[in-house]
Image (spheres, helix red, strand yellow):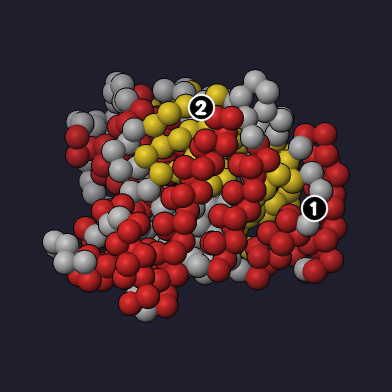
Amino acid sequence: MRCEERFSKIYKRDPESHTFCPYRVCPIGAHVDHNLGKITGFAIDQGITFAYGPKKNGIVEVTSLQFPKRAQWHVLNSPLPERDWADYLRGATRSLGAKYNLNVGLCGVFDGSLPIGGLSSSAAVTISFLTALARVNGLELTRQEVVDFAYDAEKNYVGVNVGKLDQSCETLSRKNAMLYLDTLDGSYEILPAHPQAKPFRFAIFFSGLEHCLVGSKYNKRVDELRAGVYALQAFAGLPYGKFDDAFARAVSLEIFWKFRDKLPTPWRKRCDHWYSEQDRVVRGAEAWRRGDVEEYGKLSFESGMSSIVNWESGAPEQIKLYEIMRETDGIYGGRFAGAGFKGCCLALVDPDKADDVLQKVTAAYLKEYPLLKDKYACCLCDTADGIEL
């Protein structure tokens, strides 16, 4: 592995161990987890590898093959965010140290197997680091603890208004199965692929545009949804408190439809997406139980359209990729991968037509955006288990 080679070059010794955390895809359930919605998702067989060794002096020293800056801090300190790639790990150190005594640091090198953008590499980096830091300190974390610590780092330290979709998919998922998660209470089901279901693979199409949630419109969209929910509670005479405690899950669909037309257009559209996406998630899970991959894919395409029209996410290049996917034979369905602010698109594809799908989508996309040829990429992936603890 490249990260092991870099580790040996930097530290003149072999790493003691390594962790691998998969990326995730969420074909249905976009932009709902931060308001306690239900989601469907999968871990895939590409991800983040972290080669590391302990440092008895408590120093954390980390390097990434994707970013130039080496970062360093002590496990007993709580450094302020530096607005770089390692903030997720500083936050994870703080979260873990708030519950457990940390004395041992580590040094290590990260490597991602795919370009950054929409597959939740930030959560994968955080989770792989968390499990490594726990190991060198003799801690055995539960899967729920891993989810909670990684979530706390991204939301409360880095400052992105995420839910627990990413962390849950990368921790709880199982190969050849779908994760059906209710973020209201953390309950979930692992739904194996139906024995009579059509086979599928995931195709990932990287637009060539770099992806970052910090500083994007992501937080603004979440706030607009929450503002709509806050207003709905007031219109309905429901008790409400702090703005950040307003969640769409607490307001019924009936109340939404009763007062929907009173909402300002941006707030209404965000709510339109949230409530319709919840319906798609439930119908998608039932389609998956029946083995109806084509129906599940159709709902994923609908999710993508709602993300464009109602959530108003997606750069023009991503939207073009989505449109090309809809016109390509062999694709059951798909949408933006992740938040949809630059990054990539995902598609569920017929394995027998997968190579042809990659060629056709690539040709059509680069015809529209030839200047992105050196940055565009595509690949095929399969389902995978969540991180091994």
Q: Nearer the viewer, residue 388 or 331?
A: 331
Please give the name of the residue rendered at 43% of the width and 28% of the height, measured from the top-left corner. 189
- The CA span between labels 2 and 1 is 28 Å
Characterize the local packing of mark 2: few (<14), some (14-19) or many (20 or more) Cα atoms within 10 angstroms: some
Please state, as top left, top right, bottom left or bottom right, where the C terminus lies in the image. top left
Frontmost residue, 327 versus 2? 327
Front-most of residues 103 and 338:
338
Q: Position of residue 309 (x, y in %)?
A: 55, 68
Point out residue 236 in the picture as x, y percentages from the top left corner.
21, 66
Count the marks.
2
Mark number displayed over residue 328:
1
- Which sits earlier in the primary sequence, circle 2 or circle 1? 2
Residue 259, visible in the rendered structure: yes
Q: Secondary structure at mark 1?
A: loop
Q: Residue at x 33, y 77 (%)?
A: 262
Label 2: element kind: strand
Disc 2 marks a residue whose amino acid type is: Leu
Q: Is residue 99 above or below residue 72?
A: above
- Tell me the residue at 78%/62% (across/down): 365
Mark 1 is surrounded, within 10 Å at the Cα level, by few (under 14), some (14 to 19) or many (20 or more) other residues, namely: some
- Residue 77 lies, in percent from the top left, at 23, 46
Q: Give the percent coordinates (x, y) of residue 373.
A: 79, 61
Q: Is residue 223 left or right of residue 67?
A: left
Residue 271, above or below 284: below
Q: Mark 1 is on which residue type?
A: Thr
Tag 2 residue: 191
Q: Is residue 214 left or right of residue 117?
A: left
Q: Which of 229 and 71 lies nearest the eye of the viewer?
A: 229
Along the horizontal axis of the image, is 53 left or right of 322?
A: left
Asked whether, in this view, residue 98 is left or right of residue 3, the answer is: left
Q: Residue 141 appears in which quarter of the rendering? A: top left
The answer to which quarter of the image holds residue 243 is: bottom left
